[in-house]
Amino acid sequence: MSYTRPIEPIRAGDDEIREALRDAHLPSLLPALAQITGDLSLLRPGLRADTSSMVGDPSGFAGGAAAAEEARALAFETLVRFRDGGSRPAPPPDRAFLRAILAWFAPDGAIEPYLPLVEEELSVAERDLRAPDWRRDALAPGRDFRVAIIGAGMSGLLAAHRLQQAGVPFVILEKNADVGGTWLENTYPGCRVDVANSFYSYSFAQKDDWPQHFSTQDVLLQYFRDCAETFDLRRHVRFRTEVLAAEYDEARAGWRLRVRGPDGREETIEVDAVVSAVGQLNQPKLPDIPGRERFGGPAFHSARWNHDVPLAGKRVAVIGTGASAAQLVPVVAQSAAHLDVWQRTPNWLLPAADYHAEIPAGQRWLMLHVPSYAHWHRFWLFWRLGDGMFLPRAKVDPAWPHPDRAVSASNDELRGLLTLAIQMQLADRQDLLPKVLPTYPPASKRILVDNGAWLEALKRPNVALHTEGIREIVENGVVARDGTLHEADVIVWGTGFQASKFLQPMRVVGRGGVDLHDQWAGDARAYLGITIPNFPNFFCLYGPNTNIVVNGSIIFFSECEVHYVLGCLRLLLAGGHRALSPKQAVHDAYNERIDAGNLQMAWGVSRVNSWYKSESGRVAQNWPFTLLEYWHATRRVEPGDYEIV
Ligand code: NAP
C-alpha cells in the first residue's frame, strides 16, 4: 500500500514547466525522466550526478552551470513530450534498466551491489516488496499465536503493520496516550528531524507533499498518526498502558507481561512472542551536577518540555549542547531576556542551507507530476547520507599519522571543510571560535545538521556561551567552576538520554530466571541487535548496535529488523516450533565482529564524550558497517543460528 497520492497528469503550460524545472534537483530528475519515458539515452554521459564530493555544486550535479542548463533543457523537452502524450508513464523498470540508472550515478560500479536493496527501498514498481509473502493461517492453520509489541512509535507501528499483513494477532502496549513515540514526547521548540523526510519515512508509505525537506515535530507526529490510521493499527493499541515486567514461561514457551493500565490497575497478559519497540532515546538523563535539586525555579528536560512555563523575558540556562539543545537554543534565544548556554563539548556542524526551508514550489510540482521523481530523490539521499558519503570518512586508517585531530586523510579533509564552514560563520566573532571549534575527529559524535542558526544564536547579545564548566546548581542559578553565579529563572536540561540502559526500567526475565539486565551487566548486546540468548521469542527493534552516527536513517534499520523478526515468526509457524533464541556462540562471534568494527570507526576510537558508549566504554549503540551489510544480515533467518524448541 502506498501513502502517495495518485500522480496528477501534466496540464501545465510550457512556461509553468520551465518555472518548475528551475527548482529541480537534477540528479533525481534525470533518472525519473528516464524511468517514465523508458528512455535511458536521457542519462547522457556528459550529464552526471556528483555523488562523491562533499562540496561542489549544491545541486549535486557535476559539470557546473553549463551541464545543469543542458539537463534542464533536456528535461523540458522530455516533459513537454510526456505531457503531450497524455502523461502516460512507461511500465515499471526491470533490473537491467535500474542497473543502468545506478551505473549513471556511479560509473565506477560502487552502487551496483545495492541493486536489490534499491528495488525494495524505492518500491520502484509501486509494490511494497518488503511486505511478508506469507500468512499465518496458511502456514499454521488454527494455531493460536499472539504477539505483544511494546511501544507505538515509529518501529512499533511498523512491526504492527507487518504482523497485520501476515495475519498474526498482536496487541500494542503503549505507555503514552497516543502513537508517535519520540515524535510525541519531544515537543521542545525547534524540534525537527535532521534526516531529510524522503528518506526518514517508511519505504512503503511515501508522501509527496512534505512541506519541508526536514520536517518539524508536529508534521512528523501527524505522519505517524496518519500511518496508524491508514494501516488500521489504532484499534490494536492499548494506550496509557505501561509494561512493568516481562517473564518467560518455559512450560508454555511464551511470555507473561505485567502491565499497568490507565486506571493504575495491574494485570498480566500472556503472549507467545514479544517485540520490544521502546527506542534507545526515551529515558531522559539528568546530570549529576551537585545541587541539581536545589534550584528554586522551573527546571525540565528537553524531552519533557513544560509548555506552562513561558520563557519570553526570562533568564534561561540551557545545560548541554547536543542535537536537542542545538535545535531549541536558537528558538529560545529569540524571546528570552538572557540565555546562558552551558557547553561541555562542541559539535561539528554540517552545512545544510535548506534545513529550515520550505520545499521549493518547482520540486513540489515535480513530486506530484513526475512519477518516481520522489523515489529517485529518496535514492539520492539514501546514497549520499547512507554508505556513499560520510561512512568511508568515519573509518580509521591505522597508518594515519595525526589521530588526535582526524582518523584518516579523508576524515581530515572533512574536518578541514567543516572547520572552514564554522570559521566563515564567525568572521565577525573570532572570540567564539576557540569555544565552538571541536578538537576531536569529525564523526566521533553525531555531526549536527546546520543552516547557521546555532552560531547565529550564540552571537546574539542576549546569549552567553559558557565552556568553563559547572561547579554546582544553587537556588537562583548556575555556579561556574570559577565561582561566578549566573542567575537563572528557568533551567532546561538538554543533557540527553540514558541510551545505554536499553529496555529499562522494564524488568525482563528469561529462561532459567535470568534477568536481562543482570545478563547484560550494563553492556547490552544482541544478535543482529534483535535476539538475545536465554530470551526466546523476545525481539528488539532499535536494539543494541543498531544506531547510526553518520549514515542512513533509523527507519531503514527498523524495516530490516522487522523483516527479520517476521522471518523468525515464519520459521516458528512453518516448522510447528514454539520458540527460538540465538545460540550463545553465534551471538558472541557476531558481537566480537561488531566490537572490532566499532574500533575501526571514529566514534569507537575517539575519547570524546558521547552517548554511544556504555559504562564499560564499549560502543553498545552503533552499527559500524554499511547499510547494505545490515540489509544482507537481516535478509533471511539462518535456522542454524538458533536454538529452536
Ligand atoms: P546528547 O546528544 O546526548 O547531548 C547531551 C548534551 O548534554 C551534550 O552536549 C552533553 O555534553 C551534555 N551533558 C550531558 N551531561 C552533562 C553534564 N553532567 N554536564 C554538562 N553537560 C552535560 O542528547 P540530545 O541532544 O538529546 O540528542 C541525543 C540524540 O537524539 C542525538 O544524537 C540524535 O541521535 C537524537 N536527536 C535527533 C534529533 C533530530 O533528528 N533532529 C534531535 C534531537 C535528538 P557532552 O557532549 O560533553 O557529553
Image: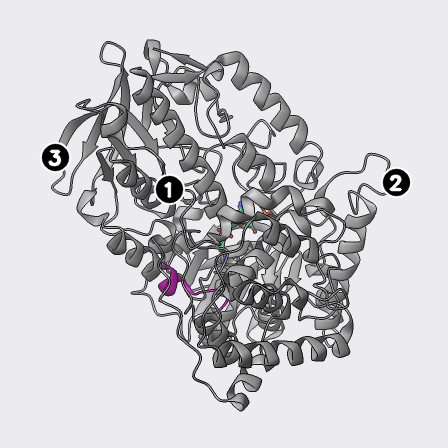
Q: In which quarter of the image is residue 606?
A: top right
- Report the residue at 37% width, 19% height from top: 535
Side of 177 relative to 63 (left or right): left
Magenta residues (range): 213-220
Q: In this view, does 226 lie above or below 645?
A: below
- Secondary element under disc 1, as helix, strand or loop, is loop
Camera-near label (3 vs 1) is 1
- Report the residue at 58% width, 41% height from top: 627
- Across and down, in percent, residue 414 comes to 76, 55
Tell me which amino acid carries mark 3: Arg
Tell me which amino acid carries mark 2: Pro
3D distance between C-alphas at marks 3 and 2: 61 Å
Q: Which of marks 3 and 2 is nearer the N terminus?
A: 3
3D distance between C-alphas at marks 2 and 1: 48 Å
Q: Mark 3 points at which residue?
A: 265
Q: How many marks?
A: 3
Q: Mark 1 points at which residue?
A: 131
Q: Name the residue under label 2.
A: 401
- Across and down, in percent, residue 309 comes to 33, 66
Is the C-beta separation of discs 2 and 1 under 8 Å? no
- Report the residue at 24% width, 23% height from top: 140
Does residue 644 belong to the magenta stretch?
Answer: no
